[in-house]
Amino acid sequence: MQALTEVLAITAFFDFMIQEIITKTIPLEQIVNDGKWSLHRDLPIQEIKDTLAASIARHGIITPPLVRRVGSASSFEVVSGYRRVAAAAQQRVTGISCRILTDSSDPMQLLERIVEEQIVSDSPLSPVMKARLFIMSGQLIKEKKQRKRFFGGLNIGSYKQLESSSALLELDPVLLSSIHHAELSEKTAYELIRLGLEEQRFIYQIIKDFSLNHNRQRTFFEMSKIILGPDLSGIKHFFKSELAEFFLLVEHRNLPQLTQKLFDRLFELSHPYLSRANDLFEKKVKELNVPEGIAITGSQSFEKDDVTVHIGFKDLSAAKDFIQNLQKLGII
């Protein structure tokens, strides 16, 4: 729903913009494709080529890249379509059909066109692309008030959030790719920024090996911070020394089961008193010899001794009879 909201807001924002565009085939050697205006420039180039090369070999470029004249009339730089041109060059084409902006001197309109092209041809902006867009806006629009007005119409986050996002681009390209493809959550990305390169790669490998989704990633950091402190000092040493057995088994065991065991162990280490209390409670429940179909759970709060009994019935009628019997006995 958030992605759809962004698309609709950005589409409405660009309704007023009219720029004349002409289409013609341009020799490949006249096209400058250095990624200057690309929102994908921070992603590994080989990944981009491999993704599109096969499709272009079969069908050609369906949506012509958008270019603008630079320097002499015979030189053009890519405004949108960086990946398409890179993949086409891999296919050794001699010329590419391009859409040429006839008037691209206004910085605000150029940025608007870049975002519009991305939304129409691909998908809503990823955190990595938003960060790159913010950097580009600072290069093109010097007045902060104008930049705020520009981003205010896009509905892709507050100016302050976007300003903070620029720090993401300091991460390793492999991590940026995982953030772009939503394998790493944006919250995880901000956690990684504060760590050294070695720790970043180590945590990324944990997330990858154990296939941690966004919720699991959040829980992982929450428990790790309780154990090691907010700065996660010594996290690699801690995992290698205290939890080494999990990494030795990751390729040979049922992954969901092993992941749950890892998180159970992290919970024990981060909540030692609660873990001991839970173990004692479970021991006492077993001593009750509770019949099959009945489960007893305790409160997760230290301040409460509440106990909940869960009873299964074959149907609603049986549950009704049970409740009525309890009422007759004055229990409820």
Image: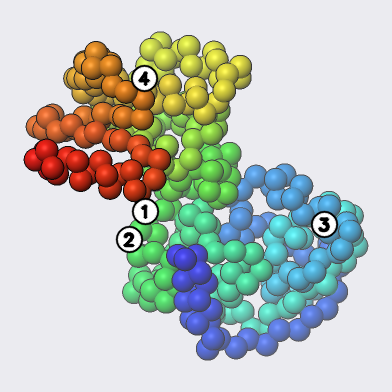
Chain-order first, disc 2 or disc 3: 3
Location of residue 29 with respect to 278 vertically, above or below: below
Task: State the SS at label 4.
Answer: helix
Q: Which residue carries the number 4 mark?
A: 265
Report how far apart the C-alphas of labels 4 and 2 lie in the structure. Answer: 38 Å
* Residue 214 position within the rendered picture, expressed as x and y whole percent measured from the top left: 45, 43
Numbered disc in front, either 1 or 3: 3
Disc 2 + disc 3, Cβ < 8 Å? no
Crowding near the residue tagged with mark 3, few <14, some 14–19, many ≥20 C-alpha atoms within 10 Å = some
The alpha-carbon separation of the residues under discs 1 and 3 comes to 36 Å
* Mark 3 vs 4, N-terminal side: 3
SS of the residue at dot 1? helix
Q: Is residue 266 left or right of residue 32?
A: left
The answer for how far apart the CA atoms under marks 1 and 4 are is 34 Å
x and y, in percent, of residue 160 in the image:
32, 60
Q: Amino acid at mark 1?
A: Ser
* Residue that badge 3 annotates: 55
Instruction: Check residue 160 in the rendering and tell me which mark sits there, or answer none.
Output: 2
Q: Sort mark 4 into few (<14), some (14-19) or many (20+) by Cα contacts within 10 Å.
A: some
Spatial separation of the CA atoms under disc 2 and disc 3: 39 Å
How far is the residue under mark 2 from the one under mark 1? 6 Å
Q: How many marks?
A: 4
**Which of the marked residues, 1 or 4, is nearer the chain's N terminus?**
1
Labels 2 & 1 near each other (Cβ < 8 A): yes
User: Which residue appears at 38% of the width and 74% of the height?
Assistant: 152
Question: Does residue 272 appear to the left or right of 152 in the view shown?
Answer: left
Please state which amino acid type lies under the numbered disc 4.
Arg
Q: Nearer the viewer, mark 2 or mark 3?
A: 3
Label for residue 164? 1
